[in-house]
Amino acid sequence: MKRQTNTSPARTLNAVAAILTATFASTAMAANFWWTGKESRNYGTASNWASNNTGTSVAASIPGSNDAVRFMAMNKTTSVFSDRFKNDGYIVWFDGAYTTGYQFFFNTSGAKVTWRGTTTGNAAFTYQRDAYSQDAKIGIGDGTDSYLRLENMTFTHSYTNLVLGWTAAHKGGLEIASGAKVIVPTTAKFHDGIRIKRGYITVDGGEINAPNSNIQVAMYNAGNANADSSVVGAFTNLNGTVTCKQFIVGAADTTNDRDNYAEFYQNGGTLAASDNIVIAQGNRTRTSGKFIMDGGKVTTAETLYVGDTGLNCATGTAHLVINNGEIGCKALRIGKQSQGVVDIYGGTIICTNECFLSNKTEYKTTQAVYIESDAEMTPTLNLLGGVLETPKMYSASTNSYATVFFNGGTLREGGNNANLIENSARLHVRVGAKGGTIDTNGYTAKLHKTLETGVDAGTDGGMTFTGGGTLALQSTASLAYTGDTKVSSDTTLSVTDKSKVDLDKFICLVNSKPEENGHAILTTTGNDVFTAADLAKIRLVDGIHSASSVRLKLSADNKSILCKRSNGLIISFH
């Protein structure tokens, strides 16, 4: 039998003591380091750091991975090295990679300080924790308005949010120049993101890579009950690259009566979110957000919400403006307990795939344009130029009306045999002075809603139907605008009754070489037929000045009007 040995009590106590000593050593309070820059402007020079907030005690080393960095010109009410950051243009040089992990506060008394790498790819600042803790804090703008510009270096953080404007009284700014990156590792959680409480971020050709984390612009929560009445945040993308999980413009989770306004602007580059992009979200009375696109590309793998605010948000506003560029999403959802407005002046919004959409309280599967309305909100989609592509559009409004307004823009079908505009009870589809276009995109698109005039006096701009497919007016729809109806020679307008079309204002646009046997530009699925008198009313306009002569004729069953090639002269041309 193997002999058992008893462990000596003294040895056991010594082992426990060693473990406790190591444990307490690993959790010892972090040292505080204050930047002085007395020796040089190099972050990695120990004599540029102090171990007290008056700068009189020179640090023995630079901040380590468990230390707190107080990069500040003002520590609350105690003046510290305030002359160092008096003017914009103060530069701190990074000649390598440096790490801290307890706390990081950046306060520069209103000045903009630049952190600049000396060598491409090697200069880096990392805030890294091993676990989540209430002590984990990383902020720009705590005791003073503060602004940091990154050039030619990488800034990485995890296990907490990077917060700009930590307190309500001060603003924080972050600029990311070309060659600079802000990284939130893929191992981070969604709450390890970037939060602009009050201030701004400008991606000036640089990059933010936070694929598992949220970016929140003008975000306040219940812990900020004493904040002032104006919360303003801005995010600007100037030819940069931004990757994140959710991107939220205007958010809060408190019911306090305070303004909360956020704005996003992009004139180039990309913004890609693997989850939703939300404009105006939160449980407060005045949460507002504006999203402006002047170029580049924005994509979300899920839904683009324009006004997805929570309870008690009757006066919040959400506004999406696209002048150029492209936005891609599964669904575009406009107005939920907020005043959601989308203005498309140029560029393209593409919503992919057709799907089932439930009511507004259980809206989950999102692959269409969905216009909501609650209380006295009047969500509006203005097609003023550019293109909106979607397989389906409808409203779930129960109290007030939502509106789609054609005034120079194009609605393009995104799927075959789809209900392009459904017969929603509280939805107006109106045509303005500049008219509009429905592009069938080679598909059969079903129109269930009447197209009304949107002008108070005079004639509106009418509608153009194009795209080489079929626009099928259902029994609930009619063309009630006052302008002309223009149908491309490769496109078919299908009606359930020919009385739904004013043939005196019907124009066939010859925009492609007509088929030899003819293509139906107008057809009726009802019991009526077209006559020679109907044919004589239609105007034929040669939009491409084709060398081939073109003419209109009735089909053999008189159910269609055909546009076809002819060996003779163009007739009915006026």
Image (cartoon, grey):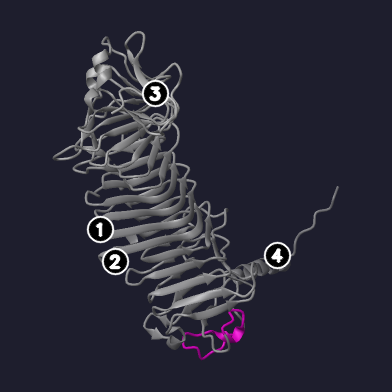
- Mark toward the start of the polypeptide (3 vs 1): 1
Give whichever of 409, 49 is nearer the camera.
Answer: 409
**Magenta highlight range:** 41-60
Residues at marks 3 and 1, CA–CA distance in whole angstroms: 68 Å
Number of the label disc, if any, that sits on residue 256:
1
Q: Does the segment drawn in magenta span residue 65?
A: no
* Amino acid type, mark 1: Asn
* Amino acid type, mark 2: Ala
Q: Which residue is mark 2?
A: 227
Number of the label disc, if any, that sits on residue 12:
4
Determine if residue 470 is in view.
yes
- Which residue is at a point 52% across and 80% down the rendered structure image? 91
* Amino acid type, mark 4: Thr
Helix, strand, or loop for circle 2?
A: loop
- Mark toward the start of the polypeptide (4 vs 2): 4
- Mark toward the start of the polypeptide (4 vs 1): 4
Rendered view: 204 above or below 349: below
Residues at marks 2 and 3, CA–CA distance in whole angstroms: 71 Å
Mark 2 and mark 3 residues within 8 Å of each other at the beta carbon: no
Nearer to us of marks 4 and 3 is 3
- Mark toward the start of the polypeptide (4 vs 3): 4
Residues at marks 1 and 2, CA–CA distance in whole angstroms: 9 Å
Give the residue furthest to the front: 569
Give whichever of 476, 84 is nearer the camera.
Answer: 476
Residues at marks 4 and 1, CA–CA distance in whole angstroms: 58 Å
Mark 1 and mark 2 residues within 8 Å of each other at the beta carbon: yes
Helix, strand, or loop for circle 3?
A: strand
